[in-house]
Amino acid sequence: MKIAFLTPEYPHPKTGTAGGIGTSIFNLSKALSALGHEINILVYGQNRDYNFIEEGIRFYIIKNIKVKGLSLFLTQKKVERLINSLFESGKLDIVEAPDWTGFTAFVKPKCPLVIRENGSDTYFCYLDNRKVKFNNKFLEKRALKNADGIISVSAFTGNLTNKLFKLNRKFTVIPNSIDASLFEPKPSDSKKLTILYFGTLIRKKGVLELPEIFNLVHHSNKDVELILIGKDSGDIKTGSCSTWELMKPLFHESSLKKVNYLGSVNYSKIQDLIKEATVCVFPTFAEALPVSWLEAMAMEKAIVASNIGWSIEMIEDGKEGFLVHPTHHKQYAERILELLVDEKKRHLFGKAAREKVKAKFCHDLVARQSIEFYKTILES
């Protein structure tokens, strides 16, 4: 099968940094290519137009058209022409795009178009208790209505998306995935007790809850260190240009001395930091099905994560990790402290977490599920 992924991001030196959408497409495209399918990656929002082939995958780098008031529409039509050209020349059968900001709202390809719901702007604004921009919601709804098929990375995301847009679109749940062989558990010689958070420093990921949680942990155990990894970001609610600067005053003076913010680090180094961590924490308010959780689970790390929506589709509380609401600071801290002192429980949680990743979230399994879904669309 010849498949194209249309995306605003992809983790490649020639396309810039990427978040969860880009990482999930990267994992899926690699797995599909390994199964013998032809993969095209169409990345818009770039600074020039060109294409290249790498490891059997063809990349189309697309520069946005800039005309005041018409940039988005003209870029959509530019992408539409490229997709149709590839389809007419026999280079693709089907195209997939994410739901984020509804880029495909006015893209009408001659081949089937599938949208994979990784969480729209409307979805994240709802979970983060923020007002969504009218234009984004309009485009996202139109894109979903016009799609030939819908995949959602979690049942929670699919159901909530339908509710928010007042749609009744049938969707198929196919989760995000990782190559578990690239995230093998590694023994650590470190005797330090460390709590690791990795991800963007942004309000919706619950990082503004972390200071109070860590204050409580530090009060009980002065030796524990909190390590933060990820790009700093601005804060929409306060207008601050730095979420890290908002976090710092929330730590007690003594606990702040045990916090180590490393900023963005190379993707390869993240595995080393996960390996050394005693416990990983993800107190997020807004996700769809986060790849970062899967990476920590695959490396057999004990996790304390949010208990909202999608989380129960990834982790069974008390089996593969602990699930606690991010605002329940005392309970969250207690769960962390419990794992810090109970090495056996950390080991049991970690083993169970990796087995779950291999059984449900492995990239080759998800690739096969995606192909079966694409077939139903092509045959309908």
Image: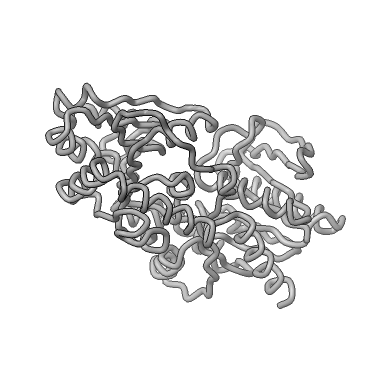
Q: Quadrant of residue 260?
A: top left
Furthest toward the right, the residue is 89
The residue drawn where x is 15% and y is 38% is 216
How far across and down, in percent of the image, does residue 232 sit? 38, 30
How far across and down, in percent of the image, does residue 183 sit? 53, 43
Task: Please indicate whether residue 118 sits to the left or right of residue 305 in the image.
Answer: right
Figure colour scheme: one colour
How far across and down, in percent of the image, does residue 13 sit? 64, 30
Task: Please indicate whether residue 23 sits to the left or right of residue 320 in the image.
Answer: right
Picture layout, residue 241 above or below residue 320 = above
The residue drawn where x is 57% and y is 39% is 68
- Residue 204 in view, yes or no: no
Picture layout, residue 30 above or below residue 380 = above
Q: In which quarter of the image is residue 177?
A: bottom right
The N terminus is located in which quarter? bottom right
Picture layout, residue 306 above or below residue 245 = below
